[in-house]
DNA sequence: GTCTATAGTTTGATAGAC
DNA sequence: GTCTATCAAACTATAGAC
């Protein structure tokens, strides 16, 4: 052992070998995001991803064993970030949630790559049983968090609703994704706060008149 | 001229040349639907489409000048059918619309190819300015039909709504597409009549209490 | 209009030097 | 870990016979 650095010690400088490797790794994921979103999974070439990340094709295969693995790692990173963002927003209480969701919807729809990546991920999922189950599990987790918030709000209002909490969560999720795609295609048809106003109306309409 | 058949006369038998050509044309569109849905636009090969249609690659290019043109013709056929179906269902009056939409949503989500084709079309649209404007125009037409029905129902109820008719139409469309994708990925989270029940609740919640 | 055969690219992935 | 060089396979599209 020529180096005296103990295991687990953080790198001394930003330019250390480990940091450079991690940076290349992230650069490849960022480049993959752009190319997969621009060309689609099938038409995306590893060569273009490498060029965009500023490395050679050989280096790409040193980090990811295949084009497919790079794509999956990219989806996973996105799913992790999405889940973390959802938990952060929900911690601020119900009244802060709707504006936060409106903002996230705009960011995703107006991003150059995010909405397309979501569609590519869905397509890959419905074509691959294994990955499809993984994405379904991720969506189920997100919707359970939403369902929890929905239940809290329903109890606070002290009313019964004509849809189950999990159904409301599924509808909210589906409407979110549908509006993202809609805004990407026809921005003028989806106002900045349309999602929030729709949910406000929906929750009011869910109330079931008390029996008797 | 060896044949005595006057111009414009209908073919004598189903096996005439013109009928055979039309049949091959439709077969190619059907095969394209299956392959584009299964593989994605970029990964789909003309060779597989030809094999699935029972013709050679050369024949494909006798009908469509490129893989892209075949894809676009396929999307257009689908859009025409979608629009025709929408108009038929809406002619039966409002009460019949919700069950009809529930049924169409199930058919699209449970089809082996339709939901994927929709996602491929959206991706192609957001990547191509020209086609994107075409698909946006198609969606605008569909939503105008929906908005007309929404306006009629709103007036029949004699109430004001907290969303414009066109906004309601956009939300209905987005929710429909979102639930199709949701059901394809997690069928158990989207009951057969969830879409109709959600719209029923939404319309109730849209009502604005009369002023004073 | 449909076929066979093929031209001309581009692709994903690997080998070996450093 | 990154590079250059390279391979075998697959691709879209065309040419010419029938």
Image: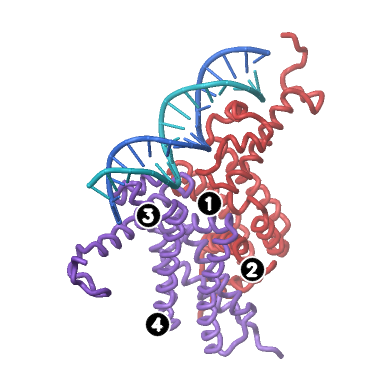
Chain colours: A red, B purple, C blue, D cyan
User: Label 2 near label 1: C-beta < 8 Å?
Assistant: no
On the image, which quarter does residue A46 sit in?
top right
Label 4's element? loop
What chain is tagged by disc 2?
A: A
Above-or-below relation of B157 to A111: below
| Crowd band around label 2 with a 10 angstrom C-alpha radius: few (<14), some (14–19), many (20+) | many
Mark earlier in primary sequence (1, 2): 1
Taking the spot 59% from the left edge, 71% from the top edge, the residue there is A202
Pointer 2 residue? A190
| Crowd band around label 3 with a 10 angstrom C-alpha radius: few (<14), some (14–19), many (20+) | some
Residue A80 point in image, percent of width and height: 63, 44
Count of marks placed on residues: 4
Pointer 4 residue? B92
**Depth check, front residue: A145 or B61:** B61
Label 3's element? loop
CA–CA distance in space, label 1 to label 4: 37 Å
Q: Is residue A101 left or right of residue B6?
A: right
Label 2's element? loop
CA–CA distance in space, label 4 to label 3: 28 Å
Residue A203 point in image, percent of width and height: 60, 70
- The reply to the same-chain question for discs 1 and 4 is no
Pointer 3 residue? B112
Pointer 1 residue? A140
Q: Is residue A184 left or right of residue A14?
A: left
Taking the spot 62% from the left edge, 68% from the top edge, the residue there is A199
User: Label 4 near label 1: C-beta < 8 Å?
Assistant: no
**Mark 3 or 1, which is nearer the eye?**
3
- The reply to the same-chain question for discs 3 and 2 is no
**Mark 1 or 4, which is nearer the eye?**
4
- The reply to the same-chain question for discs 4 and 2 is no
């Amino acid at each position: 052992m020529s180096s005296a650095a103990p295991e687990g010690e953080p790198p001394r400088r930003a330019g250390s070998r480990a940091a450079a490797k991690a940076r290349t790794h992230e650069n490849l994921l960022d480049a993959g995001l752009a190319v997969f979103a621009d060309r689609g999974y099938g038409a995306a070439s590893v060569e273009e991803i490498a060029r965009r990340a500023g490395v050679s094709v050989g280096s790409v295969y040193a980090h990811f064993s295949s084009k497919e693995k790079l794509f999956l790692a990219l989806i996973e990173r996105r799913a992790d970030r999405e889940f973390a963002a959802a938990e952060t927003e929900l911690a601020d209480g119900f009244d802060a949630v709707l504006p936060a969701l409106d903002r996230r919807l705009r960011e995703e729809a107006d991003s150059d790559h995010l909405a397309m990546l979501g569609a590519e991920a869905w397509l890959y999922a419905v074509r691959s049983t294994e990955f499809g189950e993984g994405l379904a599990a991720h969506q189920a987790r997100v919707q359970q968090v939403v369902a929890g918030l929905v239940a809290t709000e329903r109890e606070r209002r002290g009313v019964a609703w004509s849809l189950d909490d999990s159904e409301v969560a599924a509808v909210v999720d589906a409407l979110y994704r549908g509006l993202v795609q809609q805004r990407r295609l026809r921005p003028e048809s989806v106002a900045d706060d349309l999602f929030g106003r729709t949910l406000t109306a929906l929750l009011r309409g869910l109330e079931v008149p008390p029996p008797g």
